[in-house]
Image (tube, grey):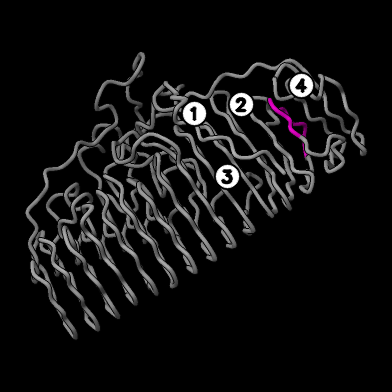
Amino acid sequence: MKKILAGVLIAGCLSLFVVAQKFGGFGGPGGPGGHSGSEEEPPEMPGEPPEGFGSVPDEEKPELTAEKVLSQDAVLSNENLTASKEDQSVLLVHHGAEVSVSDSTFNKKGGNSSNDGQSNFYGLNAALVVTEGNLTLSNVEVYSDADGSNAVFATGKKSNIQIDGIKIYTKQNSSRGLDSTYGGTISAKNVDITTEGAHCAAFATDRGEGNVSADGGKALTSGEGSPVIYSTGNIQVSNLQGVATGSEIAVIEGKNSISIKNSNITGGTKTGHGNTGSAVMLYQSMSGDAGQGTSVFTVEDSTLTSTSDGAFFYVTNTSAKANLKNTKLVNQTGKLIQVSQNNSERGWGRKGANGGSLEFTAENQVLEGSIEVDEISSASLYFNAGTVFTGSINSEKQGKVNLYLDKSALLTLTDDAYVNVLSLEDKKGSNIVSNGHTIYYNKNAAENKKLKGKTIKLKDGGQLVGIEMEFAEPKTFGGKFDSRQKPPAPPKAR
C-alpha cells in the first residue's frame, strides 16, 4: 500500500520506494508517524489532477512460493515450520483448499521481500498467506524477521482465515500483524500481536479493501507509521488492549471504516517535520489504495488515550463521520477536532482544494477542547443525549459549522462561537453555560428560521446573536467535492 506520504505509508506497514522519490516519500503531514522527505511541493495543477496524480499503480500479481504449499484439504497439528528465502512464505493455502492448523509454530526467519508493492498488495513473503481457500488457526505462533513479511495475510474475495488463539511477533519494516486485501477476510479471537518495525499496523487492510475483525487480546506497535489499526477496508475490534508508541490509535483512508468496542487503546503522533499530530486520522492520500468517499470511525464503551500534541481527531482531504458513544477520551492537549486542508507535500489532494468535511455525533460523551475548522472545510456537530462539551467551536469564524444540541446535552463555552446552523431542542438555551460568550449564528440559514434572527440572552451573561454569514463549500479530493459522497444527515438531536 504505497501512499504519497513521506516516510509513512500508513497502510499500517508499507515500504518506501518509487513514490518517495516522486513526492518526498510516503506519509506526511498528519500521517501516522510520518516525517518529511523532500520539502518541495508537487507543482500546482489547474483543475482536476491528471490521471495517476498521487497514485501508485497496481503491481503485477506474483507467483507465490512457500516452505509448505497446500492446494488440497488438510489438517495439521504440532507443526514447526521455517522459511528463510527471499520472497518465500512459510505456509501458502490456495486453489480452494480447506486447511485447519492447531498447536503449531511458523517462523519467517530472514529472506526479505524483493518487491514492496507485491508484499503489500498480494502477500508476497508473508509468513502465512491465503490466496483462495479457507484457513483455520488455533493456538498458533507466527514469527517474522524479514522486511516486507506480514504475519497473516488474506488476499482475494475467496480467501478466509479464522483464528482462535494466536501470538504474532514481527521485527522488521512493512510487516503487519493481520492484513487483508482485495476483499479477503480475517476473523480472529484471542490475539497477542507485537510489531517492531516501521509501517507495521497490528490490524490492517490494503488495496482493494479487505475485512479484519478481532475480539479479545492485546496489540503493541512501536515503529513509526504503525498505528494499532489502519483501514483501507473494514476493521472491527472489541475487547482489545492496544498501544502504539510511535503512531496513531487509528487511521482510515477514504471510504472505509473502523469500529472499536469495549477496548482500551493508546496512541498519537507529534506535530513537526511536516506532520500534523493526532490520535485518530481520517484522510485520503490519493494513492489509489482507497476509494474516494466517506471515512467512518465508530467507537463505543471504550477508552481512547492520545499521546499526541495535536488534535485528537484530524480530518483532511476527505469527508468523514466520527460516531462516539459512552467512550472516555484522554487528551493531553486542548484541541479536540481539527478539520482542515493540508499542504499537499505528500500528494494528499491539490493544495487549496484538500479540506475536510466531518459529521461528528456524540452520545453520552464527555468532550473537552477546541473544535477548529478551516475556510475550505466543514463540520456538523451532533451533541446528543447525555453529552457534555466544554470548549470552543469555530472561534476563528473560518469554516462552515452546524451545531445540533439535544436538550439533555450540556454545552459550556470557553470562547465565542460561530455556527452556520444552530439547532436547539431547548429553545431557550438553558443547557448552555456561556461564561459570558456569544454564539453567533447565520440568520439567513433556512434551518435557523425559527430563531428569526433574534438575539437571545442566556442566563449567565452570554447570548445567541443572528448575523449574516457566508461560508465556502468544502473543497476536497483535489478540488472537486462530489455531493453524492456526502454522508447522509443523521436524525436531529433528540
Q: Which one is earlier in the sequence, the residue at label 1 or at label 4?
A: 1
Could you say which quadrant of the image residue 417 lies in? top right
Using the numbered discs, state the Cα–Cα distance from disc 3 to disc 4 in whole angstroms.
33 Å
- In what element is the residue under mark 2? loop
Using the numbered discs, state the Cα–Cα distance from disc 1 to disc 2 in whole angstroms.
10 Å
Q: Nearer the viewer, mark 4 or mark 2?
A: 4
- In what element is the residue under mark 3? strand
Using the numbered discs, state the Cα–Cα distance from disc 1 to disc 4 in whole angstroms.
29 Å
Using the numbered discs, state the Cα–Cα distance from disc 4 to disc 2 in whole angstroms.
21 Å
- Label 1: few (<14), some (14–19) or many (≥20) C-alpha neighbours in 10 Å: many
Span colored in magenta: 414-423
- Residue 73 in the magenta stretch? The answer is no
Dot 1 and dot 2 residues touching (CB under 8 Å): yes
Q: Is residue 301 above or below residue 271?
A: below
Q: Nearer the viewer, mark 2 or mark 3?
A: 2
Q: Which one is earlier in the sequence, the residue at label 1 or at label 2?
A: 1
Q: Which residue is mark 3?
A: 311
- As drawn, the label of residue 70 is none
- As drawn, the label of residue 399 is 2
Could you say which quadrant of the image residue 154 lies in? bottom left
The residue lying toward the viewer, choosing from 426 and 272, is: 426
> Which residue is depicted at the point 45% across and 24% down?
481
Q: Amino acid at mark 1?
A: Gly
- As drawn, the label of residue 449 is 4
